Amino acid sequence: MDRGTVGSANRGRLQVEVRTEGRSEIVKPVGELDHHTAELLRVPLEEALAKGRTRLVIDCSRLEFCDSTGLNVLLGARLKADAAGGGVHLAGMQPVVARVFEITGAGAVFTVHDSLESALDD
């Protein structure tokens, strides 16, 4: 499901795809996650949690950038999923995105997988 786009064709653009596979809600942000686009990710994460989907897998394989606003969206989803007995799994992070999690220490509070396949197998 395409959640829309924000920004120009070259910068500030984010598309979010959502699908259910087994017990996981797979959310795939494509593009740049920043203060201009964070709401496009926040909405489907909150909708999934409202539907009782507490195992969220974020397929980061096509996420090109993540700033502190994007990180806060993911941290908020993690808190809500944990409170509901689930969790947030990050899969396939590109080095530039992984660096944000490394610098902030946020990677320690998520379950991080090398690939979407390993996240789904977990």
Image (tube, rainbow, N blue to C red):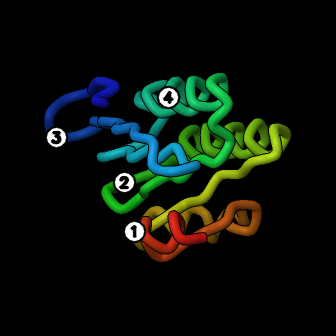
Under mark 3, the amino acid is Asn
Give the residue at mark 3. Answer: 10
Q: Secondary structure at mark 4?
A: helix
Q: Are marks 2 and 1 in contact (CB under 8 Å)?
A: yes
Q: Is residue 31 left or right of residue 10?
A: right
**Residue 63 marker:** 2
* The N terminus lies in quadrant: top left
Give the residue at mark 1. Answer: 94
Q: Earlier in the sequence, mark 4 or mark 1?
A: 4
**Where residue 72 sits: x, y (%)?**
65, 41
Residue at image coords 32%, 37%: 14
Q: CA distance from mark 2 to mark 3?
A: 14 Å
Q: Earlier in the sequence, mark 2 or mark 1?
A: 2
Residue 45 vs residue 94, the one in the foreground: 45
Q: Are marks 1 and 3 in contact (CB under 8 Å)?
A: no
Give the residue at mark 4. Answer: 44
